[in-house]
């Protein structure tokens, strides 16, 4: 089967045809679907091994002879149905079920003393999701492509104009928020990967020589991170769950663009702008969308000018190109739609599972965790310690660049309101320039960059 795969240019289809020829008659649809899944899994395994062995048949024979020699690779490459959502999530019941529940909501009417009535209409947005779910919902096949416009990494590299028609958002793809928490982590990862390659100036690393250079640079940068910032980056976690690039590392690293630029040798202005943009999409105040878009465009141009040899990651592309569009189509600031709420429940689940649930069976255990989650999410109970929680989260002040991008309240008497976005941008530069002394403490808002508690395990 491996030979068929190599001889036919690594085509999944060829392997499928080859297997189909082995059947006397075409099996039923169910079976075909199953076979297809298995072939897909086989091909992805084969690709991995092929790459690992530097695309040489000789190396394959040498290092992976056991895998090749298995009588029936096909039978062993079982597809697991566990884990993150697949296409069935959108095709099947889950999304449709949610949509149906939303459509059944009726406006809530409340009569105050006297005659006054208050109508509350509901608008529900599915924003507590992560990248994988978003890809499924927007029908994006590859995790490297942009879920909003569908552009692929090659296009990220070749298209240098942010207004290009290739970057036009797909219909309905803008209503799923922007996942600000994950955006920080993905951006840090992107910065790291870019910095490993900064001397090579190559997107894909193929030759053994380059791989060595990359490895060297990686450990060099990791060391610098530890020395100057006290952060361990891009290393597997001790307990085996994921790696050390979590929200807190990302926040600390990106919040200090000067040091980050020194460590990674990436353009300082770009990093500084990226920090501003990330705070804007995580903040719970209205942002001036037009001005924000100009700012993103400028950052996009800086990137394209300096690093056009390295394709942006889908997340960075989404943030630079589409965040203003998402902001425009959302009725509340993006920070309010963040997935922090659901992510911060994770630590509660861990604790509840260990300390507040029966352990005599898996079913009971899950039931207790679920019941407790239902109880603690009751509006009355969850608001009990609200003020305590608000005070215990660490607040940070907005940098002046972010304040300048905030939407100002409408003011009828303000005559020198900038009329064009160009004017607005000039004014913005003035506010952000270093010699501006108007920036006193009164312009500092506080933003809740949520600090995660110590992990429970
Ligand atoms: Zn896009």
Image (tube, helix red, strand yellow):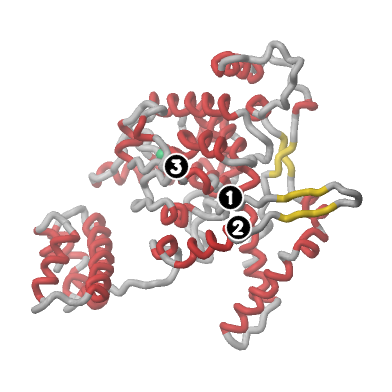
- Label 2 CB sits under 8 Å from any ligand 1 atom: no
Calculate the distance from the C-alpha at mark 2 to the C-alpha at mark 1: 10 Å
Residue 451 lies, with reference to residue 47, above or below; the image says above
Q: Residue at x 53, y 55 (%)?
A: 129
Which mark is first along the chain, 1 or 2? 1
Is residue 364 placed above or below 79 in the rendered structure? Answer: below
Regarding mark 1 in the picture, which secondary structure is present there? helix
- The answer for how far apart the CA atoms under marks 1 and 3 are is 14 Å
Q: Secondary structure at mark 2?
A: helix
- Seen in the picture, residue 184 relative to 5 is either above or below; the reply is above
Residue holding disc 1: 247
Question: Which residue is identified by label 3?
Answer: 190
- Mark 2 vs 3: CB contact within 8 A: no
Q: Residue furthest right?
A: 114
Specify few, some or many for label 2: CA neighbours under 10 Å numbering under 14, 14-19, or 20 or more: some
Label 1 Cα neighbours within 10 Å, binned few <14 / some 14-19 / many ≥20: some
2 or 1: mark nearer the eye: 2
Seen at 65% across and 74% down, the residue is 369
In the drawing, does residue 182 fall left or right of residue 141?
A: right
Whether label 2 touches label 1, CB < 8 Å: yes
Front-most of 237 and 376? 376
Q: Which residue is mark 2?
A: 343
In this figure, what is the number of numbered marks? 3
**Image x and y of residue 440, in percent:** 77, 23
């Amino acid at each position: 089967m491996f030979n068929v795969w190599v001889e036919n240019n690594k085509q999944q289809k060829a392997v499928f045809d080859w297997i189909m020829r082995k059947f006397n008659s075409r099996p039923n649809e169910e079976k075909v679907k199953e076979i297809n899944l298995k072939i897909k899994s086989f091909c992805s395994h084969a690709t991995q091994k092929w790459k690992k062995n530097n695309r040489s048949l000789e190396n394959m024979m040498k290092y992976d002879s056991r895998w090749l020699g298995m009588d029936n690779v096909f039978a062993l490459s079982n597809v697991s149905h566990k884990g993150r959502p697949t296409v069935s999530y959108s095709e099947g019941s889950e999304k449709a079920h949610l949509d149906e529940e939303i459509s059944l909501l009726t406006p809530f009417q409340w009569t105050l003393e006297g005659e006054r009535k208050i109508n509350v209409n509901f608008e529900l947005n599915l924003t507590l999701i992560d990248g994988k779910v978003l890809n499924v919902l927007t029908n994006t096949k590859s995790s490297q492509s942009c879920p909003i416009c569908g552009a692929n990494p090659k296009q990220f590299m070749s298209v240098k104009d942010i207004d290009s028609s290739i970057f036009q958002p797909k219909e309905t793809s803008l209503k799923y928020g922007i996942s600000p928490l994950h955006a920080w982590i993905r951006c840090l990862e992107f910065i790291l990967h870019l910095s490993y390659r900064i001397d090579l100036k190559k997107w894909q690393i193929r030759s053994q020589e380059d791989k060595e250079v990359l490895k060297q640079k990686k450990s060099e940068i990791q060391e610098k991170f530890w020395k100057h910032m006290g952060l361990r980056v891009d290393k597997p976690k001790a307990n085996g769950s994921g790696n050390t690039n979590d929200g807190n590392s990302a926040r600390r690293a990106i919040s200090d663009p000067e040091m980050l630029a020194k460590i990674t040798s990436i353009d300082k202005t770009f990093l500084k702008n990226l920090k501003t943009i990330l705070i804007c999409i995580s903040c719970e105040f209205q942002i001036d969308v037009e001005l924000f878009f100009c700012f993103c465009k400028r950052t996009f141009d800086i990137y394209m000018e300096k690093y056009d040899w390295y394709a942006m990651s889908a997340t960075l592309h989404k943030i630079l190109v589409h965040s203003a569009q998402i902001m425009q189509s959302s009725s509340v600031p993006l920070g309010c739609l963040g997935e922090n709420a659901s992510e911060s429940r994770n630590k509660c689940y861990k604790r509840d599972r260990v300390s507040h649930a029966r352990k005599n069976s898996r079913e009971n255990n899950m039931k207790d965790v679920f019941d407790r989650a239902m109880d603690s999410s009751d509006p009355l109970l969850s608001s009990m310690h609200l003020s305590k929680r608000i005070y215990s989260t660490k607040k940070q002040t907005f940098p002046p660049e972010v304040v300048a991008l905030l939407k100002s309240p409408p003011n009828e008497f303000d005559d020198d309101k900038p009329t064009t976005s160009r004017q607005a941008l000039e004014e913005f530069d003035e506010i952000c320039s270093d010699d501006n002394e108007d920036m006193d403490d009164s312009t500092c808002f506080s933003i809740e960059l949520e600090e995660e508690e110590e992990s429970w395990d």
